[in-house]
Amino acid sequence: MEENKTSLPENAQRELKPGEKYEPLLSPKKTYPEVTFYSVSVGIVMVIIFSAAAAYLGLKVGQVFEAAIPIAIIAVGLTGALGKKGGLGQNVIIQSIGGCSGAVVAGAIFTLPAIYILGVEVNFMQMFLSSLLGGVLGILFLIPFRKYFVKEMHGKYPFPEATATTQVLVSGEGGGKSAKTLVLSGLVGGLYDFVIATFGAWGETLTTTVVSLGQTIADKAKLMLKLNTGAAVLGLGYIVGLKYAFIICCGSLLVWLVIIPLMNVIWGGQVIDLMGTGITQTIGEMSADQIFKEYARHIGIGGIATAGIIGIIKSFGVIKSAVRLAANEFTKKPGAEKTASERTDEDIPMKTVVFGVVIALLVVFAFFAFGGVVNNIWQAIIGLLIVGIIAFLFTTVAANATAIVGTNPVSGMTLMTLIIAALILVAVGLKGNAGMAAALIIGGVVCTALSMAGSFVTDLKIGYWIGTTPRKQEAWKFVGTIVAAATVCGVMLVLNKTFGFTGDNALVAPQANAMAAVIQPMMNGGGAPWLLYGIGAVIAIVLTAFKIPALAFALGMFIPIDLNLPLLVGGAISWYVSTRSKDAKVNAARQDKGTLVASGFIAGGALMGVVSAILKFANVDLYLSSWNAQYGEAVAIVPYLALIGFLIWTSMKTDKNQ
């Protein structure tokens, strides 16, 4: 039976040949248990637990973890322990509902705590509606694009997180050699990352400053390189592959080897405060990291925004076909014969999606107008337009980024949204505390919508590979969003009353502090780094003209280099193990085995990251600070090379018959 298959079909992650069709594990011609009392109830419990944990830890220790993979591991273990039949389809629903936790948490804690930081009052209902409406819009805006991302673009995007989660679900259900490989690699990757985070036995990051010459160059020329040594990031790079990893790293290298040193040469003696945030240091006095955070990453934001707009223009045909499909449903005469579709290709009807979008936007308007967000109807209309236009346009950008690199640049897009919202709100007379609160709530809606879109496209890809019913995933995603929004906002209120977000011993909330630092000067006459955004835009346009994927390159400019270089290492390993034999089948088998090992690294790293964060929150300090400071970085290369060796050796230890 299909449920007992232990791996995805051979053509799951490559482009299909003319006339070839992808057949998922669960046959489209049969029905399987998916939405059951068990799967829904467990999914809701997962939402509550992981929403509370992610919000708590994210705000308390500044560490946001991705919940999808740990939830998949728990679902597989629980279903197996209870002896549930037809567990694969039910586990997808559990993971899909539970995955709402990470999406809503990211949307909420990136923006809403900034309201408290700025000393503005906000109530539970305002926070709840901001998170809920954003999540609902993210789901509704993505549904029309499901077929494009998960079906029409089959094999063109690596979908690293979806790959890892699918491997957990499939291998755990089927058992056998695949499950053993996944468990072994999960233990290796998980323990490796746990030792780094909890004990600090070796450095988490390798930098060129480990030698005195490198430190001198970094101090004088602001030129340095950094590489994260984590197993999870290495596994991510393997799945992303060499092509996209190389493009992403090119973006990083342009920023760190050219732009940052060049800024030091040209403006080293000047104090440049583009946003009115109170910068007093000259660029020459800043470290390369500071220059990146204050200036260079904004080039990446401009590039992401422009690449996204270009992508929207290019995919106009997809948007037009989605609109045409909706129009056809509305103009279809009553009693007209309905075209039959396979179970695995059924979405929520477009008519329902359109009505849902209209209702959600009307509620957004009512929330802004009568919920104490803005002062009058005109400002509510402006807020509605900001939310509707930006959320819709950048939904596809969030989904695209997640499909490429497994990372959603939601903080960069939210920062851009806050700046646009602040400028427009100031222009229509909404300033001061009221303006800051309004901009942050509007930003919270958009941020949650984009976060949800990135998370949901992963769920839908998992369902596509396995063969579940999209309509059921889409419908129950709304339930998970409601529960997650209520849980996150409740936890946030309790944390504010217990710890607070300002003062001594306050919660860290790094993302929200960054948002507050941007929005406050904007509402008091400050500016935006339009020059930097413009440079990013020009780079994106030039790349597009030369047919280079601009979004992947811009992601490299925005995401810190220490998280990008490991992608290149992992991508190079993927290329190496899949090209050593003259037999294409052997190469394919090795590539698939490596994908399983890499998925184990990601799964183990994600799970042990949660454990490490909990220990940190509980003040269990086992970190070898003095050892790490003195020797950690110097010895890190040894275990990192051993980890690389394990990935290569395990991947190569297979043949076409295994």
Image (cartoon, rainbow, N blue to C red):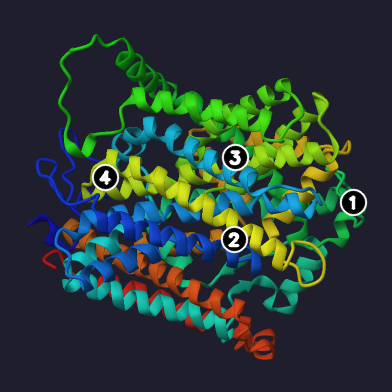
> Mark 3 is on which residue type?
Val
Circle 2 residues within 10 Å: few <14, some 14–19, many ≥20: some
Q: Kindly state the secondary structure of the residue where label 4 is placed.
A: helix
Up/down of 128 relative to 427, above or below: below
> Mark 2 is on which residue type?
Val
For the residues labelled 2 and 3, say whether their Cβ atoms are less than 8 Å apart: no
First in sequence, mark 4 or 2: give its number.
4
Residue matched to label 3: 445
Residue matched to label 4: 464
Of circles 2 and 1, which is in front?
2
Residue matched to label 1: 278
* Distance from Cα at disc 4 to Cα at disc 2: 34 Å
Q: Kindly state the secondary structure of the residue where label 2 is placed.
A: helix
Q: Give the residue displayed 55% in from the left and 58% down from the top.
A: 564
Residue matched to label 2: 491
* Distance from Cα at disc 4 to Cα at disc 1: 49 Å
> Mark 1 is on which residue type?
Gly
For the residues labelled 1 and 3, say whether their Cβ atoms are less than 8 Å apart: no
Q: Residue 375, how many percent across, how many down? A: 77, 28
Q: Quadrant of the C terminus?
A: bottom left
